[in-house]
């Protein structure tokens, strides 16, 4: 059997090149329990299950794993394929522990999967248990496709679901703005230090030797660097290194980090790489696993001070390749930062013959690419820069939190504009995974509170009439825009419907009481009423009432005064008085001070 992709020949004929038949490979996996897997998203691995035993049961599982790792199968990456292998091994450990006699597919029953779920829960977290049972169920579904008559009807029904879902874990939170700024500054300092160590100091040391020490030591240092450049790395076994080591001891100089010091003049180290990752993630928001896989050809379409970063996001099935337009300039810009990493990693990349952006020296050897920096390495970065949280404790640096930190910072800057916030994912994902996090909860609560207050103020705000508005309404009552018949507009403006602090367009149609009944609220409730109409003629009474409220501070506690007069005082000082011309307000203050013929308080309140 031959399978191929089509190619158009010179005469327009379709030619199908020969491709090896996968059937022998699949059969070999089923009988030897070993196979080589090349995953569709890159990378390869050898799957070897020969040590598990139970060959009649293991054969169908090995064949199912082979299919899972093929193009179109659920394992598109090495990490996913390894997870399937690990789940299979856990299942065999469970069988050895609980069911040593189970050796054939026909013997499997739903109870075995349910017991396996309970066995896992005793040894692993909910997430690991659920993911493990899900992979075993997935393998059994492939087994059923290969051997349709093997599994029982009850077992097939059990394969329709995985198990009891686990409680979702808490969302990963962002670092606060203080930690964000500290991380940015720490990363910036380390990046500049790496550039100075390799380019400036490195060139000087290779030419002249170090500043400290005598001429013999400096000469030995230059020779050691020459040997390092020739071989790529140098170790304690080299005579020239031993000679330099001895000379430094003789002169009382430090020798503890001599290997790292020598290589540091030529290569980046792991601490430098952590700084680059921190700075790149906090300035672009690219997922940390995508930052780790950048190549030296990731910059595209540089123009106008901007450049595209092309990267692969393996989780985005069907749309793995992404591009992000960023600023391009000095090392403080994302484009300039990547160019600096390219420059400083050139020598290591040449020796390793790699396309990875990250080529560096670590633990005595040159390394290409980044796995998972150890907790100790990340803690060392934090300790060197004394980065602490709000309680003054050293932070736990988790690189996967940097994207959310950048997102939450951008969210605050754009005031929640989803068009700017949702980059390379949907608005729903942006809202659920990046906006709905504890770090932004106070911002959301404040926004909701401000919105409700604004809506309430808008709904209850009185109608303010400037002098020119009064003149217009007197001339054209039918265009007054008030909830009154045109015939009653003149009476309202002449004062026949005046209350203590305002004219009223509906004293018997109050929004606070029943229709047809008198308004039931205190007289200063006019300031919160949509039926109130405040004209310039009422300003002296309003100013006098405000003065009265301020005087009441002396006889009431702060909480009592706020509860009784706080809202009315804020309405007068923040909304009513600023709306009128300064000259009109000044005249009202003069009349309020004289109080000649001014009735601004009900008799019972004035008596108190």
Image (cartoon, grey):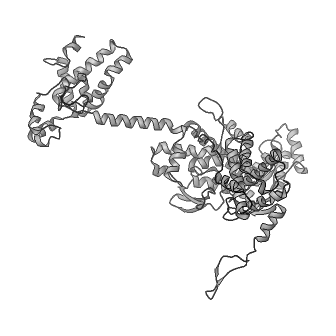
Residue 261 visible in the picture: yes
Q: Residue at x 57, y 45 (%)?
A: 404
Residue 293, relative to residue 464: is it above or below? below
Residue 47, given in percent of the width and then of the height, sits at: 79, 58
Residue 349, relative to residue 481: is it above or below? below
Residue 345 visible in the picture: no
Does residue 314 appear to the left or right of 204 in the view shown?
left
Locate the N terminus and report the quarter of the image it occupies. bottom right
Locate the C terminus and report the quarter of the image it occupies. top left
In this orientation, which residue lies closer to the viewer: 593 or 543? Answer: 543
Residue 294, given in percent of the width and then of the height, sits at: 65, 57
**Most extreme residue toward the bottom, as rendered?**
11
Does residue 41 appear to the left or right of 447 in the view shown?
right
Does residue 412 appear to the left or right of 100 in the view shown?
left
Q: Residue at x 65, y 30 (%)?
A: 393
Residue 487, given in percent of the width and then of the height, sits at: 8, 37
Residue 110, given in percent of the width and then of the height, sits at: 71, 50
Quadrant of residue 115 within the rendered picture: top right
Residue 103, relative to residue 519: is it above or below? below
In this orientation, which residue lies closer to the viewer: 19 or 260? Answer: 19
């Amino acid at each position: 059997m031959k399978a191929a992709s089509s190619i158009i020949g010179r005469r327009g004929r379709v030619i199908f090149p020969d491709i090896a038949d996968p059937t022998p490979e699949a059969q070999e996996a089923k009988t030897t329990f070993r196979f080589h897997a090349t995953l569709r998203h890159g990378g390869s691995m050898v799957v070897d299950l020969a040590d598990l035993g139970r060959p009649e049961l293991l054969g169908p599982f090995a064949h199912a794993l082979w299919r899972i790792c093929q193009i179109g199968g659920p394992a598109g990456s090495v990490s996913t394929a390894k997870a399937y292998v690990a789940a299979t091994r856990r299942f065999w450990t469970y069988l050895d522990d609980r069911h040593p006699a189970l050796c054939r597919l026909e013997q499997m029953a739903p109870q075995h999967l349910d017991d396996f779920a309970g066995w896992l829960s005793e040894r692993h977290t909910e997430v690991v248990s659920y993911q493990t049972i899900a992979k075993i169920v997935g393998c059994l579904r492939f087994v059923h496709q290969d051997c349709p008559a093997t599994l029982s009807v009850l077992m097939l029904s059990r394969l329709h679901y995985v198990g009891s879902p686990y409680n979702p874990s808490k969302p990963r939170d962002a670092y606060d703005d203080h930690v964000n700024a500290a991380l940015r500054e720490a990363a910036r300092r380390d990046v500049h230090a790496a550039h100075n160590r390799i380019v400036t100091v490195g060139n000087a040391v290779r030419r002249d030797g170090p500043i400290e020490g005598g001429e013999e030591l400096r000469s030995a240092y230059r020779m050691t660097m020459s040997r390092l450049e020739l071989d790529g790395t140098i170790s304690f076994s080299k005579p020239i290194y031993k000679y330099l080591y001895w000379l430094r001891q003789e002169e009382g100089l430090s020798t503890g980090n001599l290997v790292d010091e020598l290589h540091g003049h030529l290569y980046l180290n792991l601490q430098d790489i952590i700084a680059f990752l921190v700075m790149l993630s906090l300035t672009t928001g690219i997922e940390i696993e995508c930052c780790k896989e950048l190549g030296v050809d990731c910059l595209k379409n540089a123009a106008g001070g901007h450049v595209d970063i092309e990267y692969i996001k393996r989780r985005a099935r069907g749309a793995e390749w992404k591009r992000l337009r960023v600023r391009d300039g000095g090392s403080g810009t994302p484009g300039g930062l990547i160019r600096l990493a390219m420059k400083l990693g050139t020598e290591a990349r040449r020796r390793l013959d790699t396309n990875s952006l990250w080529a560096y020296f670590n633990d005595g050897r040159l390394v290409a690419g980044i796995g998972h920096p150890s907790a100790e390495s990340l803690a060392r970065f934090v300790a060197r820069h004394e980065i602490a949280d709000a309680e003054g404790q050293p932070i736990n640096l988790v690189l996967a939190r940097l994207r959310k930190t950048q997102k939450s910072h951008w969210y605050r800057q754009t005031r929640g504009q989803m068009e700017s916030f949702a980059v390379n994912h949907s608005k729903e994902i942006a809202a659920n995974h990046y906006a709905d996090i504890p770090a932004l909860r106070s911002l959301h609560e404040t926004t909701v509170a401000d919105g409700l207050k604004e809506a309430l103020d808008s709904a209850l705000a009185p109608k303010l009439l400037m002098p020119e508005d009064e003149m217009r309404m007197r001339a054209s009552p039918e265009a007054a825009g008030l909830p009154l018949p045109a015939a009653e507009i003149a009476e309202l403006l002449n004062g026949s419907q005046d209350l203590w602090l305002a004219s009223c367009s509906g004293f018997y149609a109050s929004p606070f009481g029943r229709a047809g009944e008198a308004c039931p609220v205190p007289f200063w409730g006019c300031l919160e009423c949509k039926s109130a109409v405040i004209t310039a003629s009422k300003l002296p009474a309003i100013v006098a009432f405000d003065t009265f409220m301020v005087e009441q501070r002396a006889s009431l506690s702060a909480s009592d005064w706020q509860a009784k007069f706080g809202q009315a005082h804020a309405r007068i000082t923040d909304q009513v008085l600023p709306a009128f011309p300064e000259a009109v307000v000044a005249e009202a203050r003069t009349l309020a001070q004289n109080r000649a013929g001014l009735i601004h308080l009900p008799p019972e309140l004035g008596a108190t």
